[in-house]
Image (tube, rainbow, N blue to C red):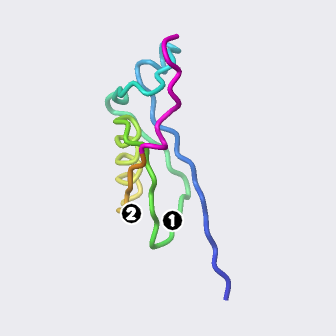
Amino acid sequence: MTSKNNLYFLRHCRTTNNIKHIITGQSDVPIIKDEIIEVNQFVLQNNVLLLCSPLLRCKQTADIFCKSINFSPQIITYPELRERNLGEL
């Protein structure tokens, strides 16, 4: 019997800063209202653990994703997953 582990990366939905081509970094901005994630033939196994940045845009995207595939994984936020601090540009 073999064990199969999968690792998926999910980028957060667009923010107004993304549209304006502004680097957001660690600023905690929300995603654009009514964003949709297209999920085509995405199959998740049981016992999935979703690791998420504590930034609002990431948590909102994870919520939209899970609702779009009717899935309720365990979600853990990790401060280490925040975007890098670019200081003052």
The disc labelled 2 sits on which kind of residue?
Pro
User: Which residue is label 1 attached to?
Assistant: 44
Residue 51: % across, % down:
45, 53
Residue 52: % across, % down:
43, 48
Placement of 48 over or under 28, stated as above or below: below
Q: Is residue 85 magenta?
A: yes
Residue range highlighted in magenta: 79-89
The disc labelled 1 sits on which kind of residue?
Leu
Q: Residues within 10 Å of mark 2 (few under 14, many from 20)?
A: some
Q: Quadrant of the N terminus?
A: bottom right
Placement of 19 over or under 37, stated as above or below: above
Outermost residue to the right:
2
Outermost residue to the front:
87
Q: Residue at x 56, y 58 (%)?
A: 41
Q: Residue at x 37, y 42 (%)?
A: 54
Instruction: For the residues labelled 1 and 2, say whether their Cβ atoms are less than 8 Å apart.
Output: yes
Mark positioned earlier in the residue sequence (1 or 2): 1
Q: What secondary structure is found at the residue carrying circle 2? A: loop
Outermost residue to the top:
89
User: Which residue is label 2 attached to?
Assistant: 73
- The image quarter in which residue 58 lies: top left
Q: Is residue 69 magenta?
A: no
Query: Separation of disc 1 and disc 2 at Cα?
Result: 10 Å
Q: Residue at x 50, y 15 (%)?
A: 22
